[in-house]
Amino acid sequence: MLRDSFRRVSPRPLMPASTDPIPVRLTDVVKRYGRRTVLDGVSIEVTPGITGLVGPNGAGKSTLVRAILGLVKLVGGEARVFGHDPYRHPRQVREMVGVVPEDECSVPGLSGVEMVRYAARLSGLPATEALRRSHEVLDWCDAGQERYRPVETLSVGTRQKVSFAAAIVHDPALIILDEPTNGLDPIERRAMLGRLTRLARNHGKTIFVSTHVLPDVQAICDRVILLARGRVRLAGGIAELTRPARPAHHLAGSGPLDRLADALTAAGLPASVTAGETGPLIELASPRPEQLAAIWSAARQTGVAIRSLAPASRPLEEIFVQTLRQAEQPVTGAAFPAAGGSHAPA
Amino acid sequence: MPLHDVGYRSWSSSRCGPAMTVWVIALTGIRLAWESRWLRRLVFFAWSPALLFAASFFAFEQAIDDGRLVTLGEKAEGGRNIDGVGMLGTVLADALGGDPNEVDIKATRRLVWTRLLLAFMRAPQAILLAAVVGLVAPTLISRDLRAKAWLVYFTRPVGRTEYILGKSVILLLLVLVITMLPALALWLIGVLVSPSIAVAWETWDLPVRAVIASLLLAVPTVLLALAYSSMTAESRIASFAWFATWVACWIAHTALTTADFVASSRQREAAVARGAASLQRPQRRRDEAAAGPLRGQFKWLARAAGIDTKLDRWAWISPYHALGAVQAAIFGIERRPAAWLPAAVALVSLTVGSLLVLAWRVTAPAQA
């Protein structure tokens, strides 16, 4: 018995408990702390790819993550991670999950590489393999020689790299990140988002990102879940949610944009000048392929140099604010569709 | 891009079981604790009493070898410090007891060795244990709470049991290094300096008793210290609680024992006043005889060695005295259940209570 406990076991626990293709499935999950309901009938599905979890402070995001990890006992509903109940079978679940917590959490006294190695050992990797793998993922995270310094003396960015490396060192199938770009400079932020995208696209990982940074969500996520006051207010694919009410393109350029808009309207492409994030741009009805030549021709005639022509999308922030405003009002069942579907707010 | 960056690679191989997790937590904890210069000094210092007791073993066996045991016993009876420690004289004078000319070597050796080992475990090591545990234990869990390192454990396949076991093993190993190992070393030295290797067979149970007594010393104290550590994120508060428990309980024990003594003295005086002094005197003489030939400055050693046979009915109130009472029973010196049973019940209660606190507190941060 004791010998079994020490010896290496087969990777059997890493196998999902069922053939459910959905890695994380929460159904009508309810969690209360005393009289305060933190999660109120939450139903979500986290599918392979990158899913963003957004919501204001106190929305219940951290509790949701803890429910997935089996750290909290649910009052009602059902949670399944790779087919396992995370509260009843936390070991099986956590072997397949890597977590990057928002809080700086480390074991004081350990260096960066020792911290990652310790995480690997706690996840069951044999000693030599744990050290080899730790250096490998730290190299991939571009931790450099900083890895040999005590964790508590590292910069925020390097600590975040160490934390991320510790989360992926055992090659989990599901990676949960809480504010992964907190405190990172723009270059590091881009690198971190790139790593997440590669893990999802090239290695088939399921990534669940809880964040306040909506541009990050829009940049890398396939799907987004908006949580407010313990309820799912919005859930769906990013592309569907950010698609404008009618198909449109945005044209950015330099020159007399108002004249170009008039010319396009005259050519049968209704267009108007609108304010974009980086300056004025033209919003026009989505052109058919044969209309593209007319656009170039109108631009040449009006003296506008076109910088970009891309399908228009609604900024996620706008959707976020709009949905939260609606959440402030008395809620009706029709206004906030059930999670898992692809719905825009009414 | 770093030279050795091979990109992200998948990993799938066999994993270690939960016992390895316990071992990993323990080894890492010991390594981090061992970085403290004070701990290293304290552990080395904790072995110094063993050297003094080894001198007693050597002096005793030499006396047997030279046929000077009776002479030595007579010197000890006379209150002379025969080994430079005072321990051997105290133990030997009691062991030889009645007629020093009819000495049963085997029985005397067993009694002397047992009492030396018990005194070693009780007097220096139990106190040094409190110091070592007090230095290491308070930070073990409180530091994890403070640095939020509990997330490092509980977001991985580490259960509450493995975590508590891992932290306990850190302390257990340190405690056993300063109690069990020197006790076993003392027995081995005793065998090596004895005239015959057959002594090992005659005293085979002593190392077993020493191991059990060490574990008894370690388990409740370690769990109590960890329970304190789990109750606060400030290790200083846990340290204070730990030392305060030992000191306060010791003071309480002393106060209650003194109160008993005062009460019995008053009763005696009252009896004298009633003219019944003649009835009390034999009882007093019996008490003095039972206490053995205690001499001045070595009284505490005699008490530690279990020579003082007065029933300590308040032992259960102080961890130090409770541990001593049960250890005396383990070494076979104390056979009266009234002397060790309340202490054993107190220690079991302390252990169970500490475990319950640990189980509750270790999951508390995750539940909050």
Image (cartoon, coloured by chain):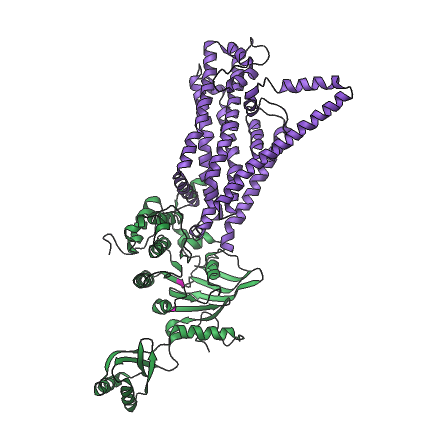
Chain colours: A green, B purple
- Left or right of A62, for residue A286: left
On screen, B213 above or below B62? below
- Point out residue A282 in the picture as x, y percentages from the top left corner: 31, 82
Magenta highlight range: A208-214
**Residue occupying image coordinates x 31% and y 78%:** A279
Residue B162 visible in this rendered orientation of the protein: no
Q: Position of residue B279 (x, y in %)?
A: 74, 18
Q: Residue furthest bottom?
A: A266
Depicted A285 relative to depicted A232: above or below = below
Along the line of sight, the residue nearer the viewer: B18 or A165 = A165
Lateral position of residue A94 relative to residue B80, left or right? left
Q: Position of residue B61 (x, y in %)?
A: 46, 15
Task: Determine the image quadrant of residue A254.
Answer: bottom left
Q: How many marks?
A: 0
Residue positioned most to the right: B274
Q: Tell me, yes or no, if residue B274 can be seen here.
A: yes
Left or right side of A313 for B105: right
Quarter of image, res A15: bottom left
Q: As displayed, is residue B215 above or below residue A85? A: above
Which of B300 and B67 lies nearest the eye of the viewer?
B300
Front in this rendered view, residue A136 or A261: A261
Quadrant in which residue A19 is drawn: bottom left
Residue A72 location (% of width, % of height): 51, 56
Q: Residue at x 44, y 15 (%)?
A: B196
Q: Residue at x 49, y 30 (%)?
A: B125
Residue B271 colored in magenta in the image: no
Q: Nearer the viewer, residue B146 or B307?
A: B146
